[in-house]
Amino acid sequence: MGDKTTAFVKGGLGCLGAFIVIGIIVAVVGGSVHLDAGGACCLFAIGGIIGLIVLAIYKSGRRSAGGE
């Protein structure tokens, strides 16, 4: 897998994981949480895009520092 694919998957799973953690906290406090397949796919895609943006910023910083 390339860097971009890894960043996309890590970002997507991180976003889903953050939703699950926040959802558990909300459910314990007394609220309700609902996630369907479409919402999970959207969260994964949004997290993946954020992962790609972070990778681009990281690579830009490495280039400007002379590390690459």
Image (cartoon, grey):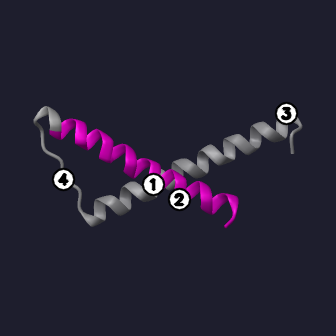
**Numbered mark located on residue 34 in the image:** 4
Check disc 1 and give the amino acid type.
Leu
Check disc 4 and give the amino acid type.
His
Q: Position of residue 55 (x, y in %)?
A: 65, 47
Check disc 3 and give the amino acid type.
Ala
Q: Position of residue 45 (x, y in %)?
A: 45, 59
Q: Are marks 2 and 1 in contact (CB under 8 Å)?
A: yes
Q: Earlier in the sequence, mark 4 or mark 2?
A: 2
Q: Are marks 1 and 3 in contact (CB under 8 Å)?
A: no
Foreground pick, 53 / 31 = 31
The residues colored magenta run 1-27
Q: Mark 1 — residue?
A: 13
Give me the residue at 80% from left, 39% from top: 62
Q: SS for tag 3?
A: helix
Q: Residue 59's image quarter?
A: top right
Disc 2 crowd rating (10 Å Cα; few below 14, some 14-19, many 20+) is: some
Point out the frontmost of discs 3 and 2.
Answer: 2
Q: SS for tag 2?
A: helix
Locate the C terminus and report the quarter of the image it occupies: top right
**Image vertical order of residue 59 relative to residue 34, above or below:** above
Q: Is residue 29 toward the left or the right of residue 36 in the image?
A: left
Q: Earlier in the sequence, mark 3 or mark 4?
A: 4
Q: SS for tag 4?
A: loop
Real-space Cα distance between discs 3 and 2?
27 Å
Real-space Cα distance between discs 3 and 4?
44 Å
Give me the residue at 16% from left, 36% from top: 28
**Numbered mark located on residue 65 in the image:** 3
Point out the frontmost of discs 1 and 3.
Answer: 1
Q: Earlier in the sequence, mark 1 or mark 4?
A: 1
Q: Earlier in the sequence, mark 3 or mark 2?
A: 2
Q: Is residue 11 toward the left or the right of residue 60 in the image?
A: left
Q: Mark 2 — residue?
A: 9
